[in-house]
Amino acid sequence: MTTNPATMSPMLSQPARPIHLYDLSRAQLRELLAEWGHSDYYAGLVWAGLYRDLAADNEEIEGLRPELHARLAAETQSQPLTVQAAIDSADGHTRKYLLGLRDGQAIETVLMDFRGRATACVSTQVGCAMGCVFCATGQMGFIRHLTPGEIVGQVIHVSRALRARGETLRNIVLMGMGEPLHNYEATMAALDTVMDQRGLAVAPRFITLSTVGVVPGIHRLTDERRPVRLAVSLHGATDAERARLVPPARRWPLAELIDACRRYSETLRRRVFFEWALIDGQNDGPEQAHALGRLLQGLAAHVNLIPLNPTHGYDGRPTEAAAVKAFQSILASYGLPSTVRQRRGIDVAAGCGQLAVEK
Ligand code: SAH
Ligand code: SF4
Protein backbone atom coordinates (compact mmCIF):
# COMPACT_ATOMS: atom_id res chain seq x y z
CA MET A 1 0.00 0.00 0.00
CA THR A 2 1.37 3.34 -0.96
CA THR A 3 -0.29 6.69 -0.59
CA ASN A 4 -0.63 7.87 -4.16
CA PRO A 5 0.31 11.58 -4.40
CA ALA A 6 -2.15 11.94 -7.29
CA THR A 7 -5.00 11.41 -4.86
CA MET A 8 -3.74 14.14 -2.51
CA SER A 9 -5.28 17.54 -2.72
CA PRO A 10 -2.35 20.03 -3.05
CA MET A 11 -4.01 22.76 -0.99
CA LEU A 12 -4.79 20.74 2.07
CA SER A 13 -2.32 17.90 1.52
CA GLN A 14 -5.17 15.64 2.51
CA PRO A 15 -6.11 12.59 0.51
CA ALA A 16 -9.07 13.17 -1.79
CA ARG A 17 -10.29 9.77 -0.72
CA PRO A 18 -9.68 8.61 2.84
CA ILE A 19 -8.01 5.29 3.52
CA HIS A 20 -10.51 2.80 4.89
CA LEU A 21 -8.72 1.08 7.75
CA TYR A 22 -10.76 -2.14 7.73
CA ASP A 23 -9.81 -2.60 4.06
CA LEU A 24 -6.13 -2.95 4.96
CA SER A 25 -4.39 -6.21 5.69
CA ARG A 26 -2.02 -6.20 8.62
CA ALA A 27 0.91 -5.92 6.20
CA GLN A 28 -0.70 -2.96 4.42
CA LEU A 29 -1.33 -1.22 7.74
CA ARG A 30 2.31 -1.72 8.65
CA GLU A 31 3.40 -0.23 5.30
CA LEU A 32 1.13 2.76 5.72
CA LEU A 33 2.44 3.53 9.18
CA ALA A 34 6.03 3.01 8.03
CA GLU A 35 5.41 5.59 5.28
CA TRP A 36 4.22 7.95 7.98
CA GLY A 37 7.39 7.26 9.99
CA HIS A 38 5.94 4.99 12.68
CA SER A 39 7.42 1.63 13.62
CA ASP A 40 5.75 -1.77 13.44
CA TYR A 41 5.07 -1.44 17.15
CA TYR A 42 2.54 1.29 16.41
CA ALA A 43 0.98 -0.71 13.59
CA GLY A 44 0.50 -3.46 16.17
CA LEU A 45 -1.23 -1.02 18.53
CA VAL A 46 -3.57 0.21 15.81
CA TRP A 47 -4.39 -3.35 14.76
CA ALA A 48 -5.10 -4.42 18.35
CA GLY A 49 -7.19 -1.29 18.89
CA LEU A 50 -9.31 -2.01 15.82
CA TYR A 51 -9.72 -5.76 16.08
CA ARG A 52 -9.07 -6.79 19.68
CA ASP A 53 -10.52 -3.78 21.49
CA LEU A 54 -13.09 -3.04 18.73
CA ALA A 55 -12.37 0.70 18.93
CA ALA A 56 -15.21 2.74 17.47
CA ASP A 57 -12.91 5.67 16.73
CA ASN A 58 -9.15 6.15 16.37
CA GLU A 59 -9.18 8.27 19.54
CA GLU A 60 -10.04 5.09 21.45
CA ILE A 61 -6.88 3.33 20.31
CA GLU A 62 -4.53 3.32 23.23
CA GLY A 63 -0.82 4.14 23.32
CA LEU A 64 -0.53 6.22 20.12
CA ARG A 65 1.36 9.49 19.91
CA PRO A 66 -0.83 12.57 19.37
CA GLU A 67 0.53 13.14 15.85
CA LEU A 68 -0.49 9.62 14.85
CA HIS A 69 -3.99 10.16 16.23
CA ALA A 70 -4.17 13.39 14.25
CA ARG A 71 -3.02 11.80 11.01
CA LEU A 72 -5.39 8.86 11.39
CA ALA A 73 -8.23 11.30 12.00
CA ALA A 74 -7.30 13.39 8.95
CA GLU A 75 -6.57 10.66 6.42
CA THR A 76 -8.39 7.50 7.38
CA GLN A 77 -11.82 6.21 8.15
CA SER A 78 -12.99 3.15 9.99
CA GLN A 79 -16.66 2.29 10.53
CA PRO A 80 -17.86 1.64 6.97
CA LEU A 81 -21.38 0.78 8.16
CA THR A 82 -24.18 2.58 9.95
CA VAL A 83 -26.96 0.72 11.71
CA GLN A 84 -30.25 1.68 10.09
CA ALA A 85 -32.42 -0.84 11.88
CA ALA A 86 -32.24 -3.84 14.18
CA ILE A 87 -35.16 -6.27 14.23
CA ASP A 88 -35.59 -9.14 16.68
CA SER A 89 -37.28 -12.38 15.81
CA ALA A 90 -39.91 -13.74 18.18
CA ASP A 91 -37.74 -16.88 18.44
CA GLY A 92 -35.63 -14.88 20.92
CA HIS A 93 -32.33 -15.90 19.32
CA THR A 94 -32.16 -14.00 16.05
CA ARG A 95 -31.52 -10.34 15.40
CA LYS A 96 -31.34 -8.91 11.91
CA TYR A 97 -29.45 -5.68 11.23
CA LEU A 98 -29.99 -3.41 8.30
CA LEU A 99 -26.62 -1.76 7.73
CA GLY A 100 -26.14 1.28 5.51
CA LEU A 101 -23.04 1.66 3.32
CA ARG A 102 -21.31 4.93 2.44
CA ASP A 103 -22.76 5.07 -1.07
CA GLY A 104 -26.33 4.79 0.19
CA GLN A 105 -26.66 1.06 -0.48
CA ALA A 106 -27.59 -1.25 2.36
CA ILE A 107 -27.04 -4.85 3.38
CA GLU A 108 -28.34 -7.23 6.00
CA THR A 109 -26.39 -9.12 8.63
CA VAL A 110 -27.93 -11.61 11.05
CA LEU A 111 -26.80 -12.48 14.57
CA MET A 112 -27.99 -15.87 15.75
CA ASP A 113 -27.36 -16.76 19.33
CA PHE A 114 -28.44 -20.15 20.47
CA ARG A 115 -26.85 -22.59 22.90
CA GLY A 116 -24.10 -20.11 23.65
CA ARG A 117 -22.71 -20.34 20.13
CA ALA A 118 -23.12 -16.92 18.67
CA THR A 119 -23.09 -16.95 14.88
CA ALA A 120 -22.86 -14.04 12.46
CA CYS A 121 -24.46 -14.52 9.06
CA VAL A 122 -22.49 -12.13 6.87
CA SER A 123 -23.13 -10.65 3.40
CA THR A 124 -20.50 -10.41 0.67
CA GLN A 125 -22.39 -8.46 -2.01
CA VAL A 126 -25.27 -6.02 -2.36
CA GLY A 127 -27.71 -8.29 -4.19
CA CYS A 128 -26.51 -11.30 -6.16
CA ALA A 129 -25.93 -12.07 -9.83
CA MET A 130 -26.71 -15.79 -9.60
CA GLY A 131 -30.49 -15.57 -9.79
CA CYS A 132 -31.56 -18.64 -7.79
CA VAL A 133 -35.33 -18.52 -8.20
CA PHE A 134 -36.28 -19.06 -4.54
CA CYS A 135 -33.81 -16.59 -3.03
CA ALA A 136 -34.81 -13.03 -2.12
CA THR A 137 -31.26 -11.78 -2.71
CA GLY A 138 -31.21 -13.38 -6.15
CA GLN A 139 -34.60 -11.82 -6.88
CA MET A 140 -33.17 -8.31 -6.29
CA GLY A 141 -30.35 -8.76 -8.84
CA PHE A 142 -26.72 -7.75 -8.53
CA ILE A 143 -25.86 -4.24 -7.37
CA ARG A 144 -22.20 -4.37 -6.31
CA HIS A 145 -19.47 -6.27 -4.52
CA LEU A 146 -18.67 -5.41 -0.91
CA THR A 147 -15.16 -4.23 -0.05
CA PRO A 148 -13.07 -6.21 2.46
CA GLY A 149 -13.77 -3.49 5.03
CA GLU A 150 -17.53 -3.73 4.53
CA ILE A 151 -17.36 -7.48 5.14
CA VAL A 152 -15.05 -7.09 8.16
CA GLY A 153 -17.28 -4.25 9.44
CA GLN A 154 -20.24 -6.64 9.75
CA VAL A 155 -18.18 -8.98 11.94
CA ILE A 156 -17.00 -6.06 14.07
CA HIS A 157 -20.55 -4.78 14.47
CA VAL A 158 -21.84 -8.16 15.66
CA SER A 159 -18.79 -8.68 17.90
CA ARG A 160 -19.43 -5.34 19.59
CA ALA A 161 -23.08 -6.19 20.21
CA LEU A 162 -22.01 -9.50 21.76
CA ARG A 163 -19.23 -7.97 23.82
CA ALA A 164 -21.70 -5.48 25.32
CA ARG A 165 -23.40 -8.46 26.94
CA GLY A 166 -20.27 -10.37 27.83
CA GLU A 167 -20.27 -12.82 24.94
CA THR A 168 -17.92 -13.50 22.07
CA LEU A 169 -18.53 -14.40 18.47
CA ARG A 170 -17.79 -18.01 17.66
CA ASN A 171 -19.12 -18.83 14.20
CA ILE A 172 -19.20 -16.91 10.96
CA VAL A 173 -21.28 -18.14 8.06
CA LEU A 174 -20.93 -16.44 4.69
CA MET A 175 -24.59 -17.10 3.97
CA GLY A 176 -25.95 -13.58 3.91
CA MET A 177 -26.56 -11.61 0.74
CA GLY A 178 -24.38 -12.48 -2.23
CA GLU A 179 -22.12 -15.16 -3.62
CA PRO A 180 -18.76 -15.12 -1.81
CA LEU A 181 -16.82 -16.83 -4.61
CA HIS A 182 -18.06 -14.19 -7.07
CA ASN A 183 -16.28 -11.65 -4.84
CA TYR A 184 -13.29 -13.84 -4.11
CA GLU A 185 -10.49 -11.34 -3.38
CA ALA A 186 -12.47 -9.14 -1.01
CA THR A 187 -13.96 -12.13 0.79
CA MET A 188 -10.56 -13.75 1.36
CA ALA A 189 -8.98 -10.47 2.47
CA ALA A 190 -11.81 -10.07 4.99
CA LEU A 191 -11.39 -13.64 6.25
CA ASP A 192 -7.65 -13.14 6.70
CA THR A 193 -8.39 -10.14 8.89
CA VAL A 194 -11.06 -11.81 11.04
CA MET A 195 -8.89 -14.91 11.53
CA ASP A 196 -5.83 -12.93 12.63
CA GLN A 197 -4.75 -14.16 16.05
CA ARG A 198 -3.88 -10.69 17.32
CA GLY A 199 -7.37 -9.39 16.63
CA LEU A 200 -10.78 -10.99 16.22
CA ALA A 201 -9.14 -14.44 16.15
CA VAL A 202 -12.12 -16.32 14.76
CA ALA A 203 -10.97 -19.92 14.24
CA PRO A 204 -11.06 -21.08 10.59
CA ARG A 205 -12.97 -24.22 11.54
CA PHE A 206 -15.80 -21.98 12.72
CA ILE A 207 -16.04 -20.13 9.42
CA THR A 208 -18.34 -21.58 6.77
CA LEU A 209 -18.23 -20.33 3.20
CA SER A 210 -21.39 -21.19 1.31
CA THR A 211 -21.28 -21.12 -2.49
CA VAL A 212 -23.80 -21.78 -5.22
CA GLY A 213 -21.02 -23.82 -6.86
CA VAL A 214 -18.61 -21.46 -8.59
CA VAL A 215 -16.21 -24.17 -9.75
CA PRO A 216 -13.12 -21.99 -10.46
CA GLY A 217 -13.53 -20.43 -7.02
CA ILE A 218 -13.58 -23.84 -5.34
CA HIS A 219 -10.39 -24.80 -7.20
CA ARG A 220 -8.79 -21.58 -6.06
CA LEU A 221 -9.77 -22.26 -2.43
CA THR A 222 -8.10 -25.64 -2.79
CA ASP A 223 -4.95 -24.29 -4.44
CA GLU A 224 -4.61 -21.62 -1.76
CA ARG A 225 -5.45 -24.18 0.95
CA ARG A 226 -8.00 -21.91 2.58
CA PRO A 227 -8.86 -23.55 5.88
CA VAL A 228 -12.58 -22.69 5.94
CA ARG A 229 -15.56 -25.06 5.97
CA LEU A 230 -16.98 -25.35 2.48
CA ALA A 231 -20.74 -25.58 1.94
CA VAL A 232 -22.13 -26.04 -1.57
CA SER A 233 -25.75 -25.28 -2.45
CA LEU A 234 -27.02 -28.13 -4.60
CA HIS A 235 -30.86 -28.24 -4.50
CA GLY A 236 -30.90 -30.64 -7.46
CA ALA A 237 -28.99 -33.85 -8.21
CA THR A 238 -29.19 -33.73 -12.01
CA ASP A 239 -28.11 -30.78 -14.17
CA ALA A 240 -31.60 -30.35 -15.63
CA GLU A 241 -33.39 -30.32 -12.27
CA ARG A 242 -30.77 -28.13 -10.66
CA ALA A 243 -30.79 -25.58 -13.48
CA ARG A 244 -34.51 -24.94 -12.95
CA LEU A 245 -33.73 -23.60 -9.45
CA VAL A 246 -30.11 -22.50 -9.74
CA PRO A 247 -29.23 -20.89 -13.10
CA PRO A 248 -25.41 -21.17 -12.62
CA ALA A 249 -25.88 -24.96 -12.91
CA ARG A 250 -25.78 -24.40 -16.69
CA ARG A 251 -22.35 -22.86 -16.51
CA TRP A 252 -20.83 -25.30 -14.03
CA PRO A 253 -22.29 -28.79 -14.51
CA LEU A 254 -22.56 -31.19 -11.58
CA ALA A 255 -19.76 -33.45 -12.85
CA GLU A 256 -17.31 -30.53 -12.67
CA LEU A 257 -18.73 -29.27 -9.40
CA ILE A 258 -18.47 -32.62 -7.64
CA ASP A 259 -14.93 -33.09 -9.00
CA ALA A 260 -13.96 -29.71 -7.57
CA CYS A 261 -15.51 -30.67 -4.21
CA ARG A 262 -13.68 -34.00 -4.20
CA ARG A 263 -10.37 -32.28 -4.94
CA TYR A 264 -11.01 -29.78 -2.13
CA SER A 265 -11.99 -32.53 0.28
CA GLU A 266 -8.99 -34.74 -0.53
CA THR A 267 -6.42 -31.93 -0.58
CA LEU A 268 -7.58 -30.28 2.63
CA ARG A 269 -8.83 -33.51 4.24
CA ARG A 270 -12.15 -31.88 4.93
CA ARG A 271 -15.73 -32.89 4.77
CA VAL A 272 -17.86 -30.88 2.35
CA PHE A 273 -21.33 -29.70 3.37
CA PHE A 274 -24.11 -29.69 0.81
CA GLU A 275 -27.19 -27.54 1.18
CA TRP A 276 -30.55 -28.56 -0.13
CA ALA A 277 -33.63 -26.33 0.19
CA LEU A 278 -36.53 -28.76 0.40
CA ILE A 279 -39.40 -27.54 -1.78
CA ASP A 280 -42.71 -29.37 -1.68
CA GLY A 281 -43.24 -31.39 -4.86
CA GLN A 282 -40.13 -29.91 -6.54
CA ASN A 283 -37.03 -31.63 -5.21
CA ASP A 284 -38.20 -33.56 -2.14
CA GLY A 285 -39.30 -36.91 -3.56
CA PRO A 286 -37.68 -40.32 -3.04
CA GLU A 287 -36.17 -40.30 -6.57
CA GLN A 288 -34.36 -37.05 -5.80
CA ALA A 289 -33.11 -38.41 -2.49
CA HIS A 290 -31.75 -41.50 -4.24
CA ALA A 291 -30.14 -39.36 -6.96
CA LEU A 292 -28.49 -37.21 -4.29
CA GLY A 293 -27.29 -40.30 -2.44
CA ARG A 294 -25.71 -41.66 -5.63
CA LEU A 295 -24.21 -38.30 -6.58
CA LEU A 296 -22.36 -37.91 -3.30
CA GLN A 297 -21.30 -41.51 -2.84
CA GLY A 298 -17.64 -41.87 -1.95
CA LEU A 299 -17.32 -38.23 -0.91
CA ALA A 300 -16.77 -37.09 2.68
CA ALA A 301 -20.05 -35.21 2.72
CA HIS A 302 -22.77 -33.94 5.02
CA VAL A 303 -26.14 -32.69 3.79
CA ASN A 304 -27.93 -29.71 5.35
CA LEU A 305 -31.61 -29.79 4.55
CA ILE A 306 -33.40 -26.43 4.69
CA PRO A 307 -37.20 -26.52 4.39
CA LEU A 308 -37.89 -23.65 1.96
CA ASN A 309 -38.30 -20.21 3.51
CA PRO A 310 -40.91 -17.97 1.91
CA THR A 311 -39.87 -15.11 -0.40
CA HIS A 312 -41.99 -12.64 -2.38
CA GLY A 313 -40.81 -13.76 -5.79
CA TYR A 314 -41.35 -17.53 -5.52
CA ASP A 315 -44.48 -19.38 -4.58
CA GLY A 316 -42.99 -22.78 -3.65
CA ARG A 317 -43.84 -24.32 -0.28
CA PRO A 318 -41.61 -26.02 2.29
CA THR A 319 -41.61 -29.81 2.51
CA GLU A 320 -43.76 -31.31 5.32
CA ALA A 321 -41.98 -32.83 8.31
CA ALA A 322 -42.86 -36.45 7.41
CA ALA A 323 -41.42 -36.07 3.89
CA VAL A 324 -38.28 -34.46 5.32
CA LYS A 325 -37.79 -37.55 7.52
CA ALA A 326 -38.31 -39.88 4.56
CA PHE A 327 -35.77 -37.92 2.51
CA GLN A 328 -33.27 -38.18 5.34
CA SER A 329 -33.67 -41.90 5.75
CA ILE A 330 -32.99 -42.49 2.05
CA LEU A 331 -29.80 -40.42 2.37
CA ALA A 332 -28.88 -42.48 5.44
CA SER A 333 -29.20 -45.67 3.38
CA TYR A 334 -26.28 -44.33 1.29
CA GLY A 335 -24.29 -43.68 4.46
CA LEU A 336 -24.88 -39.99 3.97
CA PRO A 337 -25.36 -37.99 7.20
CA SER A 338 -27.80 -35.09 7.14
CA THR A 339 -29.15 -32.38 9.42
CA VAL A 340 -32.36 -30.40 9.12
CA ARG A 341 -31.49 -26.75 9.59
CA GLN A 342 -33.43 -25.16 12.43
CA ARG A 343 -35.70 -22.44 11.15
CA ARG A 344 -34.58 -19.12 12.52
CA GLY A 345 -35.90 -15.62 12.19
CA ILE A 346 -38.51 -16.44 9.55
CA ASP A 347 -40.96 -13.93 11.08
CA VAL A 348 -38.54 -11.08 10.39
CA ALA A 349 -37.31 -12.46 7.05
CA ALA A 350 -33.87 -13.25 8.51
CA GLY A 351 -33.87 -16.90 7.41
CA CYS A 352 -31.75 -18.47 4.66
CA GLY A 353 -32.47 -16.82 1.34
CA GLN A 354 -34.76 -14.17 2.78
CA LEU A 355 -32.28 -11.31 2.95
CA ALA A 356 -32.98 -8.47 0.58
CA VAL A 357 -33.05 -4.73 0.82
CA GLU A 358 -35.99 -2.88 -0.60
CA LYS A 359 -35.16 0.49 -2.05
N1 SAH B 1 -24.68 -17.45 -2.33
C1 SAH B 1 -24.36 -18.48 -1.39
C2 SAH B 1 -24.57 -18.08 0.04
C3 SAH B 1 -25.83 -17.30 0.40
S1 SAH B 1 -27.35 -18.16 0.38
C4 SAH B 1 -25.11 -19.75 -1.71
O1 SAH B 1 -26.04 -19.70 -2.50
O2 SAH B 1 -24.73 -20.80 -1.19
C5 SAH B 1 -27.28 -19.24 1.80
C6 SAH B 1 -28.10 -20.51 1.65
O3 SAH B 1 -29.51 -20.23 1.67
C7 SAH B 1 -27.85 -21.26 0.35
O4 SAH B 1 -27.71 -22.63 0.58
C8 SAH B 1 -29.12 -20.99 -0.42
O5 SAH B 1 -29.34 -21.93 -1.41
C9 SAH B 1 -30.16 -21.01 0.68
N2 SAH B 1 -31.42 -20.40 0.31
C10 SAH B 1 -31.63 -19.39 -0.55
N3 SAH B 1 -32.95 -19.08 -0.60
C11 SAH B 1 -33.58 -19.92 0.26
C12 SAH B 1 -34.94 -20.08 0.67
N4 SAH B 1 -35.90 -19.30 0.20
N5 SAH B 1 -35.22 -21.03 1.57
C13 SAH B 1 -34.24 -21.80 2.09
N6 SAH B 1 -32.93 -21.70 1.74
C14 SAH B 1 -32.60 -20.76 0.84
FE1 SF4 C 1 -27.10 -15.70 -4.78
FE2 SF4 C 1 -26.89 -17.68 -2.99
FE3 SF4 C 1 -29.21 -16.38 -3.34
FE4 SF4 C 1 -28.33 -18.03 -5.24
S1 SF4 C 1 -28.93 -18.59 -3.15
S2 SF4 C 1 -29.16 -15.98 -5.58
S3 SF4 C 1 -26.14 -17.68 -5.13
S4 SF4 C 1 -27.33 -15.51 -2.57
Image (cartoon, rainbow, N blue to C red):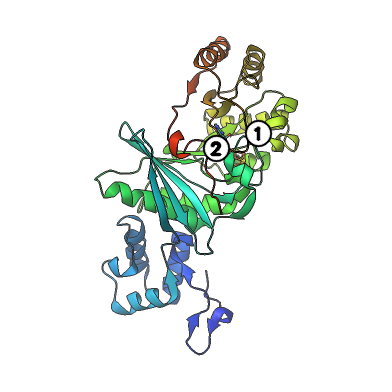
Q: Quick check: is the Cβ at mark 1 less than 8 Å away from ligand 1?
A: no
The residue that disc 1 covers is 260
Measure the C-alpha gap from mark 1 to mark 2. Answer: 24 Å
Q: Quick check: is the Cβ at mark 2 less than 8 Å away from ligand 1?
A: yes
The percent position of residue 234, horizontal first and vertical second, equals 62, 29
Residue toward you, 140 or 293: 140
Q: Please state the total of marks drawn on the protein image.
A: 2
Q: Is residue 318 left or right of residue 155?
A: right
The residue under the point 35% across, 53% down is 198
Residue type at the position of mark 1 = Ala
Q: Quadrant of ligand 1?
A: top right
Residue type at the position of mark 2 = Gly
Q: Choose the circle earlier in sequence order: 1 or 2.
A: 1
Q: Is residue 215 left or right of residue 204?
A: right
The percent position of residue 248, horizontal first and vertical second, equals 70, 38
In the rendered image, is residue 37 in sight? Answer: no
> Within the image, what quadrant is residue 78 found in?
bottom left
The residue that disc 2 covers is 353
